[in-house]
Amino acid sequence: MTRIFNDPAEFAEDQFTGFLDLYADRLRGVPGGAVALRSGEPQVAVVVGGGSGHYPAFAGLVGSGFATGAVVGNVFTSPSAAQVYSVAKAAHQGRGVVLTFGNYAGDNMNFGIAAERLRKEGIDVRIVVVTDDVASASEEDKRRGIAGDFSVFKVLGAAAAAGLDIDGVERAGRAANAATRTIGVAFSGCTLPGADRPLFTVPEGQLGLGLGIHGEPGIRDEQMPAAHELAQLMVDSLLEAAPQGGGKRVAPILNGLGTTKYEELFLLWGTVAGLLREAGLEVVDAEVGELVTSLDMGGVSLTLMWLDDELETFWRADAYTPAFRKQRAPVAAIGGFAQESGDDVRESHAIPEATPAARALAGTAVGALETMARILHADEAMLGDIDAVAGDGDHGRGMVKGVDAALAAARIAYDGGAGAAWLLQAAGQAWAEHAGGTSGVLWGAALEAAGRSLTDGRSAYADQDFVAAGQAFSAAIVDLGRATVGDKTLVDALLPFVEELAAGVGHGAAFPDAWRAAAAVAAEKAEATASLSPKLGRARPLAERSVGTPDAGATSFALLAGGLADLPAGALAL
């Protein structure tokens, strides 16, 4: 359990402040993360990232021979697209950027959005996704990224430090991922800061096979074996999943997840090493310790990267970061290099003129966001409990962070004279930036889309304008999330809601009546997700555990739709 914190909701930000102060001689903070102080010739920027709670991943790997920058999200939550953009822009040295992260829905979405924006600005951006977890899926491209992140990041960083161009760095990273396999086991669950119980428990005398690093439990529980049997289980699992033509040299990582003692890891490694050699494998520069953790989870993972000559060169290359040092030659001094300005890279624009109708609607929209904030604060714990059944338990906290940021931005925009369209776009950008995660990006993009639909130049707004805004809201979520009805996501409540709203208005119902009817449908459909098996997102590998519990995203949407039902019609355009 995490005991040292102030406000649990600010744990990620507070710990990162201390980290930046401690290592100010070799890296600097930028909005969304950290970048290494520059030295030597420009190189391809390797930007790693994901949620907090995994130290040394991700910020602890920023430095010479490793990552150029790290994006830092909330605990177990994808960083926002705005954070990824900010760090990548700061890390860019004129030779392109490789974004690399574990294979999770929120990370894929946020890093992908940031890449598109950077490319529009003329920056060459490549993406290398880590898919090493053999327990999470049989298809390699659907596997999660867990401790194999470290192996792939190390190869990418060494390739960039060696002066390869962006094609070469990307190729090396993809080769490393294709050659990397991981299996993990959990002995106990991890506890989020401020929580009074872990995200999951493992029955006494058992272990959870196939854990995730975001607090997800294993895919099944098994009897806890003796150390030599555990080593055999892990080695056999990886050898069965070995890449075709992988060869005989491997780079192993025996990784502690947070509370497994180093002495236990050393004991386990003694057996693992013997089993690998008995299988005819040559062990190259094994790493044993905590490299990709999950807060205070009790557990261990074994990673193998099958090596060719190039991968071995990059794996064994020098590196110097806050959390990892490999040195075969003198390392140059780290501090004292010239560095670019740390100014915020986010763009700002003047608020455009709005009609009286747009200003009036803006005031109503602020009221709607205030209502949404009250609802989400009241139901934060409940939403987190729902999400923790097969996910990481952060949905309630993420929604609260998002709506609070959106409300603050909306109030600033309103005080500055903004109309509803501009205000909702500002609110959406703030939601996406501060909430992080999949839901943060979806809600942020959806609010922006609703705002763009309304525009601020109208003399009056009709009910059909609000329907169109709702349709734009839902279209943005579908376009970004790629979910359909039946996937057990927010979409299961959202699309029926929008369809019912449009049908009601189309048949002449007053907008508030149509909204109330649509909200009732959303509540019904959200509750019905309990019987569904998830097909997308982090809950997918734990589909059986999810059945019987409604989807957290659909539930939060239904709560908000119902809570807004008594507001004036203009507030209901979301």
Image: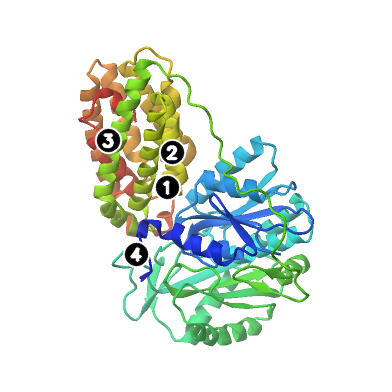
Alpha carbon separation for disc pair 1 and 2: 9 Å
Question: Mark 4 is on which residue type?
Answer: Leu
Q: Amino acid at mark 2?
A: Gly
First of labels 3, 4 by sequence position? 4
Q: Quadrant of residue 223?
A: bottom left
Callout 3: SS: helix
Label 3 and label 2: CA atoms lie apart by 16 Å
On-image quarter of the C terminus: top left
Dot in front, 2 or 4: 2
Residue 53, percent across and down?
46, 64
Mark 1 → mark 3, Cα distance in angstroms: 20 Å
Reading the image, the residue beneath label 2 is: 444
Which image quarter: residue 375?
A: top left
The quarter of the displayed image where residue 476 is located: top left
Q: Mark 3, residues whose alpha carbon is within 10 Å: few (<14), some, or many (≥20)?
A: many
Instruction: Please indicate whether residue 375 sits to the left or right of residue 189 in the image.
Output: left
- Indicate which label's residue lies in the foreground, 1 or 4: 1
